[in-house]
Amino acid sequence: MTLIRFDEANAFLAGLVPGNTPSVILLTGESFLVRRIQRQLVDQLVPEADRAFSYAVYSGDTDIRVAIEQVNTYGFSTGPKVVAVTELPFTSDKKQTARRLDRIRKNVEASKPAAAATGLVALLSALGLDPADYTEAPSKLWAAIEGTSGEAPAWLGDLLFHIRDHQLKAAAPEGLPDLLANAAAAGFPDGNVLVVTTDTLDKRRKAFKTLESACTVIDCSVPKGERKADREIQEKVMRMCAAELLDAQGKRLAPAGLSALMDLTGFDLDTFTGNLEKLIDYAGPRQEITAADVRQLLVRTRQDPIFELTSALADRNAGAAVFYARSLARAGMHPLQIQAALVNQVRRLLAMSLFIKNHWGEHAGTAMPYNAFTARVMPLITAFDARLDEWAREDEQALACQSLASEKKKAPQKKTASDRRIGGSGKSAYPIYQLFQKAGKFTPDELVRALNRLLETDQVIKSSAIDPLGLIEHAILTICSCESLPGGCLR
C-alpha cells in the first residue's frame, strides 16, 4: 500500500484519525526510531483513559495468529483497538537467536514458564527445528541451537515438556508475511489496527515486497556504514532527535556542544538521547547547554572504526593514531588485530608509493582533484594491477609445478586479487584516490623501514610479556615522526 520514510512519519501520523487508518502498520529499522513512532501512533489513536481496554502489546515470541485474533475482536470502548506485536523476527541469524535466548532465560528466571515456552517454540520454528524431536534429548537440541556440543541448561528440558504437554505451535517465519498481508486485505472491525515492529526485515527479500504491497510500512532504517553519505544521514537523524528533545524542554544546545556530543557517542541513539537528557538536567535553569557542559559531564562511549586509526597513520598524525589505537583496545579489539591493520595499511601505502615512483613520476605530484585522478591516474593503476595479476598467476603456476614435484603434493596457497592490487576489489575509486594522496607523504624507503618496524613489533608482542599496546604506540610514534629526509629516520 504505502512506504513511508521515518522523516515523513510525523506528517503521516498527523493525518491519522480513528476509524480511518490502515489495518496493518509495520515499523521496521532502527529500534530507537521504531519505538518513538510506535508511541506517537498509540498517542494519536488511543486516548490514555481507554488504553486499559483498547491497547494490547505482545512480544515477538507470541504466535502472530494470537495477535490477529485479538485485533479481530471488538473492544469495550467506542474507539478503535490497537494491538502491537514488538520485535517480530522475520529471519533468524546468530544475533537474533542470541537475543531470543536471552529473553527466554529472563522469563525462566522470572518464573514465567508459559512465556518462556512460547518463546522457545517461536525460536525453534524460526530455526526449522521441531521440539517434539528433542523432548528426550535437550542436549542435542542445545547443540543444534548453539552450534557447539555441551550440556544443556536444566530449564531447556522443562520447557520441552511444557511445550509437549500444552501442544504449543508457532507460525513458520516464512508464513508471517502472507499472514499479515491477508489480515491487511481482510481488514479488522471498528477500524482496529495491528502494529508490528521488527528490525530484521531485509528490503531485498520477497517478504518485504509482500508486506509493502499489502500493508503500510514505515521505514526507520538508517545506514550504519562509515561512508560520507552514511555519516551525513546519521548526523541528520541525531540532529532531528536532539531538536525534538530540546524543544520539548525549552533548551538550546550550542553547535559546538552538539558536535562534541555526537563525537562522544557516535551513532547510538539510545546513548545519544540518554546523554542529552543528562545534559538537560545538568543545565538546570539555564536555557543553553554548552560544549563545556558536554566535556564536564560525559565520557566517550563511541566505538571508533578501524579506518580512523589507519587513516591517522597514513596522515602521519601520531597523536590521533595513538588515540584511536587506545580507543580500539578499550573497545575490546586484540592488540594483534590492531597491529595487523597497521601492517596492511603500510603495505598498501608502499605499493602505491612504488607505483607513484615507477609509473606516475615523483615530480608529477599527488595533489589533484578527484575528477582529474579518475581520468589521468586511475587507468594507469588499472593497468598496473593487471600486470600484478599476471605476475601472480605466473607465481602460482610455478608453485603448483614445485608442489607436484614434491612428495607432499600440497596445493599452493592462493591470494585473492584484492590482496595484491592497489585498487583492491571495491567499486569506488575514492578510497584509492585518498591512498594516492596519502602515499605522497612517505618515501618508498621510509615505508620499507616502517613495515620492518611493525614486523619486529609483531615478533616482540608474540614472544615477550611487554605491554603490546605500548609497543604498538611506540611503533606508531616512530613511523609518524619521521620526516622525508635522506636515509629516513626509522632505525
Image (cartoon, rainbow, N blue to C red):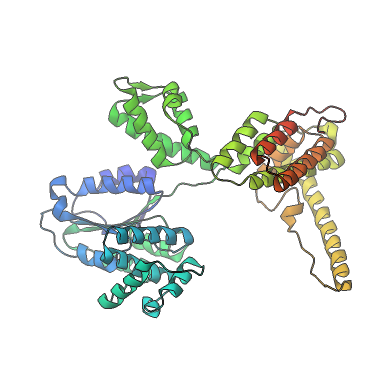
Regarding residue 482, the answer to whether it shows in the image is yes
Regarding residue 369, the answer to whether it shows in the image is no
Q: Quadrant of residue 91?
A: bottom left
**Is residue 175 depicted above or below 476 in this figure?**
below
**Is residue 85 depicted above or below 283 in this figure?**
below
Tally the numbered discs. 0
The percent position of residue 206, horizontal first and vertical second, equals 44, 65
Judging depth in this view, the residue of 490 and 199 nearest the camera is 490
The percent position of residue 153, horizontal first and vertical second, equals 40, 66
Side of 434 relative to 231 (left or right): right
Side of 414 relative to 213 (left or right): right
Q: Identify which residue is drawn at 76% across, 51% down.
A: 421
Q: Identify which residue is drawn at 33% across, 57% down.
A: 106
Q: Identify which residue is drawn at 78% across, 38% down.
A: 450
Which residue appears farthest toward the top when viewing the image? Answer: 286
Q: Quadrant of residue 253?
A: top left
The percent position of residue 18, horizontal first and vertical second, equals 18, 51
Q: In which quadrant will I find the N terminus?
A: bottom left
Judging depth in this view, the residue of 310 and 334 nearest the camera is 334
Judging depth in this view, the residue of 434 and 63 nearest the camera is 63
Judging depth in this view, the residue of 325 and 108 nearest the camera is 108
Q: Identify which residue is drawn at 74% across, 28% down.
A: 481
Side of 360 relative to 30 (left or right): right
The percent position of residue 96, horizontal first and vertical second, equals 43, 59
Side of 5 relative to 47 (left or right): right
Q: In which quadrant will I find the C terminus?
A: top right
**Is residue 341 depicted above or below 153 in this figure?**
above
